[in-house]
Image (cartoon, rainbow, N blue to C red):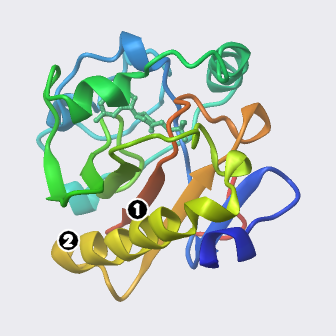
Amino acid sequence: MAAAAAASSSGSFFILRGAYATATATAASLKASPRTAFSLFSPHRLRLSPTPSLSRRSVSYVRATGNEEDAAKAAAATADSGASTIFDKIINKEIPSTIVYEDDKVLAFRDVNPQAPVHVLVIPKLRDGLTQLGKAEERHGNILGRLMYAAKIVAEKEGILDGFRVVINNGPGACQSVYHLHLHVLGGRQMKWPPG
Ligand code: 5GP
């Protein structure tokens, strides 16, 4: 299984190439539309240089720290409670999202707090115990493959096949903030390495 094979012991799962800068969320607190997320007043206190009027490829993205780590620790405390997450609301269309790709098993939508000109989240519609990649069992192989393939479709649709990154943050050590497995598909700018 490609995702499992790419797992590192650090708790982050970096797949493919490029750099990664993440901002995590206290998911329920985010209400902004995907295209209005470049805010100096975001809950993540991102220090973003651009204004929303700049083209998406001229924007620079700076990772914030500290708050994300605290939010991730708080999220981890209820990770296995079985509680629904903000992604359930997105799946059920109870809150809006900008959908990039959808099929019977997978939903891909733009991240409300993008860390690159293209930042799309790819999630299974049915969580089925996959609060995080670290909970994957052999029976999840099919959906994990579907998610990976959907990431490729998203990259293709977004025109970033020549350079994109797929990231899975796993657990508080990797600043996971939403406990419903999701792949971040990032691209549209030059990625750096090592990631933060
Ligand atoms: P994680 O930090 O768990 O790896 O990633 C969770 C991601 O979900 C974050 O990048 C965050 O910006 C995104 N997110 C949280 N809440 C929402 C939301 O309501 N809508 C959208 N589109 N993205 C969200």
Q: Identify which amino acid the numbered label 2 is placed on.
A: Glu
Determine whether the beta carbon of the residue marked 2 sits less than 8 angstroms from the nearest atom of ligand 1.
Answer: no
Quarter occupied by residue 29: top left
- Residue at position x 72%, y 14% in the image: 77
Is residue 20 visible in this depiction of the protein? no
Earlier sequence position, callout 2 versus callout 1: 2
In the picture, measured across the screen, residue 93 lies left or right of residue 19, that is left
- Residue at position x 27%, y 53% in the image: 108
| Ligand 1: quadrant of the figure | top left
Cα separation, mark 2 vs mark 1, equals: 10 Å
Q: Quadrant of the N terminus?
A: bottom right
Residue farthest toward the right in the current orientation of the protein: 9
Q: Identify which amino acid the numbered label 1 is placed on.
A: Val
Residue tagged by mark 2? 158
Quarter occupied by residue 42: top left
Residue farthest toward the bottom in the current orientation of the protein: 162
